[in-house]
């Protein structure tokens, strides 16, 4: 017989907190089900609301208390709508959404004020963003800017994050350079 928690045994300590991304998860799940059921327009509306929620979550720059990492939330929200746009033949909207995901992640990764944990996560998740964008741009006759532009942006952001990590490691060791005067 399964043990059940009785109301008198409930406490704040035993409660499972509602994570900050619960609304995004609900919207995305409902949209996925609508899409699976062939209800494309209701799915699009739910995915749009999901993107709005993803934007709200991502704007907090707080990577804590989510079931899904913030960069993944942004990627998934943009890519779901981009896929619907591509299926509709709206390549311009598809591209806009893929670039939106890229811009959000690269922007957060480049900002020294963004928590380092989130900067690193953005760099890690940019591989998915860049992959989708590269696939989309390959279908275009003359992509402007070409995929190389986005690769250079990613390399620069990754170098900045790597530099920040190395600087933090050196500054904590009194036998090393201390404060080297380099900027993030």
Image (cartoon, grey):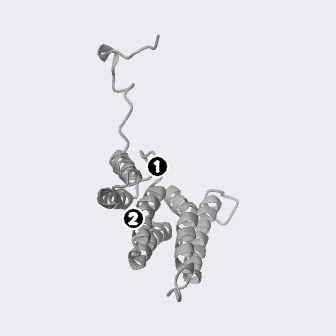
Residue under label 1: 68
Callouts 2 and 1 close, C-beta under 8 Å: no
Q: Quadrant of residue 10?
A: top left
In the foreground, 164 or 46: 46
SS type, badge 2: helix
In the foreground, 106 or 139: 139
Residue at 39% x, 71% y is 88
Q: Quadrant of residue 147?
A: bottom right
**Horizontal and vertical percent position of residue 2:** 46, 14
Q: Which class describes the residues within 10 Å of circle 2: few (<14), some (14-19), or many (20+)?
A: many
Frontmost of labels 2 and 1 is 2
Q: Is residue 29 left or right of residue 109?
A: left
Q: Quadrant of residue 40?
A: bottom left
Q: Which class describes the residues within 10 Å of circle 1: few (<14), some (14-19), or many (20+)?
A: some
Q: Is residue 157 above or below residue 80?
A: below
Residue 81's mark?
A: 2
**Horizontal and vertical percent position of residue 30:** 35, 48
Residue at 39% x, 59% y is 58
SS type, badge 1: loop
């Amino acid at each position: 017989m399964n043990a059940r928690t009785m109301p008198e045994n409930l406490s704040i300590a035993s409660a499972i907190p509602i994570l900050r991304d619960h609304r995004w998860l609900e919207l995305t799940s409902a949209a996925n089900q609508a899409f699976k059921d062939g209800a494309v327009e209701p799915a699009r509306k739910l995915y749009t609301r999901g993107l709005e929620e993803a934007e709200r979550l991502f704007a907090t720059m707080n990577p804590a208390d989510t079931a899904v990492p913030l960069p993944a939330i942004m990627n998934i929200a943009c890519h779901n709508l981009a896929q619907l746009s591509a299926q509709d033949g709206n390549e311009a909207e598809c591209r806009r959404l893929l670039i939106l995901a890229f811009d959000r992640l690269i922007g957060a990764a480049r900002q020294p004020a963004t928590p380092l944990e989130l900067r690193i996560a953005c760099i890690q998740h940019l591989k998915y963003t860049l992959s989708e964008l590269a696939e989309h741009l390959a279908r275009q006759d003359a992509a402007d800017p070409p995929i190389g532009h986005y690769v250079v942006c990613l390399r620069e952001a990754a170098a900045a994050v790597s530099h920040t990590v190395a600087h933090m490691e050196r500054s904590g060791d009194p036998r090393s350079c201390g404060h080297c005067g380099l900027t993030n």
